[in-house]
Image (cartoon, rainbow, N blue to C red):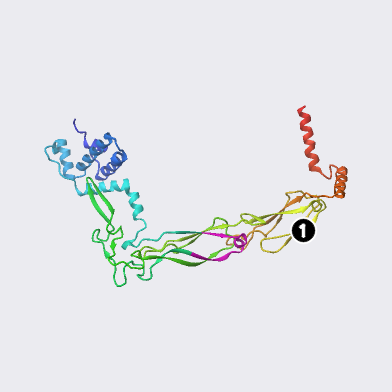
Amino acid sequence: MSKRDFYEVLGVQRTATEADIKVSFRKLAMKFHPDRNPGDEEAEIKFKEINEAYQILMDPQQRAAYDRHGHAAFEQGGRGGFGDGFASSMADIFEDLFGDIAGRQRGGRASGGRERGSDLRYNLEISLEEAFAGKTADLKIPTAMSCDDCTGTGAKAGSKAKTCSTCGGHGRVRAQQGFFAIERTCMACQGRGETIENPCPTCRGDGRVLKERNLSVNIPAGVEDGTRIRLAGEGEGGLRGGPSGDLYIFLSVKPHALFQRDGADLFCRVPISMASAALGADIKVPSLDGEEAEIVIPEGTQTGKQFPIKGRGMTILRSKNRGDLYIQVVVETPRNLNARQRELLREFLAESSDDTQPESEGFFGKVRDFFAGGN
């Protein structure tokens, strides 16, 4: 079977530049790579074909020979070996295919094995009053901190870490596997670039020990449920003197016995007697700041009526202003009436008219009209 033209294999013109050839090769190599096409023999054949074409066209001398004589220029062992450019580009292809994994492995590590500590989360529950006024919270957080005996180096006092002889301090080693130049984490130093011959007996070479850290955290007035506070550098200590992670405090606000919160506004349900609702009254209601407020209940107030009190709600975060307090009245139906009370109530209902119970009369009037229309 005759070979296809190398330019055709790579999908480029004969006048293509090296950059054009490399771009096309990278795209095709990623598409037909065996790892992306397991068990696909046709993809494997195409992958080998584009590799051969790329080897020839990226070498200036071999490309010139191919342009003059075609495939005949490389028959009978005339083709040379792979150049550095080919190995480098194939390494780039490998990075495209698998670099995300390698990137995650390298992401948190600094030079000399000084790896950044992990971020920590602390859940803190506060009352609605504390969210209203703010507070200073004293926390005790168990975490890994720098070892005092070795100052975080991991090496025994009087000694120090040495550059890894396997990777030369890079933390990674390169190995050639066929067409690919693969870079892996150095197993001798676990990617740190250093080895410790005499580890610190206190931290066993880690550079960190478990301690309880005491912190004072300012909770500002007006915080809401779910607020996150970030304390930079207060997380887990870094490995072998590396930078510390961050501490994230997640706030939750406990339900309140009297008030419900909606943003900066507060709502409070206040029961009133049937007589107060019918005749009107002045009542005192609580507010979250501890001071009472007074509202006027007009005659004929119905259940669910809301009375707003301006500026008596929640503190607004980073502001001197406050939301509003809404008092929602609930007319309480009397229970356990004695005989005289029942008699008086029946007399009242017998003498009531549309004027005394307009909503009830209006509703049942609509009910009568509904059934009348249905007949």
Residue at far top of view: 375
Residue at x 88% of width, y 43% of height: 351
Q: Position of residue 183 (x, y in %)?
A: 27, 52
Q: Is residue 358 visible?
A: yes
Q: From the viewer's side, name the closer residue of 264 and 150.
A: 150
Residue 131 is inside the magenta segment: yes
Which of the 4 image quadrants contains residue 281?
A: bottom right
User: For this view, does 338 lie left or right of residue 247?
Assistant: right
Q: Judge whether 128 appears above or below 274 on screen.
A: below
Circle 1 residue: 283
Q: Position of residue 111 (x, y in %)?
A: 32, 62
What secondary structure is marked by label 1?
A: strand
Q: Position of residue 237 (x, y in %)?
A: 40, 64
Residue 325 is inside the magenta segment: no
User: For this view, does 331 lie left or right of residue 259?
Assistant: right
Magenta segment? 123-140
Residue at x 29% of width, y 47% of height: 94
Residue at far bottom of view: 158
Q: Quadrant of the N terminus?
A: top left
Residue at x 23% of width, y 51% of height: 175
Crowding at dot 1, Cα within 10 Å, few <14 / some 14-19 / many 20+, comes out as some
Callout 1, which amino acid? Ile
